[in-house]
Amino acid sequence: MILYYDNMNYINLRKYYSETLGQSSLSVIHLENGVRTEFLNTRIPVEDRPVYLRLYVQGRQSWFEWSYDGEKYEKIGCIFDTTRFSDEYCKYGEFTGTMAGITCADRVKHAHYADFDFLEYVQEQGE
């Protein structure tokens, strides 16, 4: 799950195989004006089964949550300042508009894929 402004500015909640932990994990990566930060202190080892990922954007704040059952969610990572996804803040690139979506990358073997069952966008009342 990703909140994306451009290739130099995004936050990404990813499920991946962690060599360090020796199992599947969830972690948040933040790319801010080309500087990459992975929040390893909030990394969570997970079972090798489907998970639900959720992104909240409320006013000037954004954060991720995850769940095994789609009912009980836990926050992962920190709260991000959504206003930084703008032309005024970003040092590189041009206006793209901030986008939310899903992503998959196999940067090692270029042979793996991800199955997504659905993507749902919900706008809260009064937003």
Image (cartoon, grey):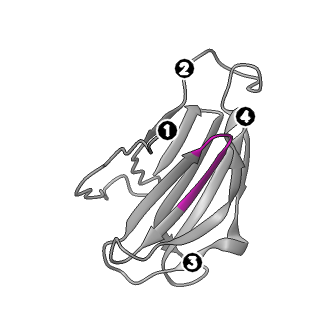
- At mark 3, the secondary structure is strand
* Labelled pair 3, 4 in contact (Cβ < 8 Å): no
Give the residue number, with chain letter if any, for mark 3: 44
Q: Amino acid at mark 2?
A: Thr
> Viewer-proximal residue, 105 or 84?
84
Q: Residue drawn 77% across and 26% down?
A: 89
Give the mark, 4 or 2, whose residue is nearer the N terminus: 4
How many numbered marks are there? 4
The residue tagged 2 is 96
Amino acid identity at mark 1: Gly
Tell me the number on the disc at residue 126: 1
Determine the main secondary structure of the stretch shown in magenta: strand
* 119, 4: nearer the viewer: 119
Which label sits in the foreground, 3 or 1?
A: 1
Q: Residue at the location (53% across, 58% down)?
A: 13
Residue sitting farthest toward the front: 126
Where residue 15 sits: x, y (%)? 46, 66
What's the distance in space between the residues labelled 2 and 1, CA to CA?
25 Å
- Report x, y in % for residue 97: 54, 23
Q: Around disc 3, counting alpha carbons within 10 Å, would you say few (fewer than 14), some (14 to 19), or many (20 or more)?
A: some
Number of the front mark, 2 or 1: 1
Kindly report the distance in space between the C-alpha atoms of the residues bearing marks 2 and 3: 31 Å
Q: Neighbour class for label 1 at 10 Å: few (<14), some, many (≥20)?
A: few
The residues bearing labels 4 and 2 have C-alpha atoms spaced at a distance of 13 Å
Q: Nearer the viewer, mark 4 or mark 2?
A: 4
Q: Earlier in the sequence, mark 4 or mark 1?
A: 4
**Residue placed under numbered mark 4 in the picture:** 84
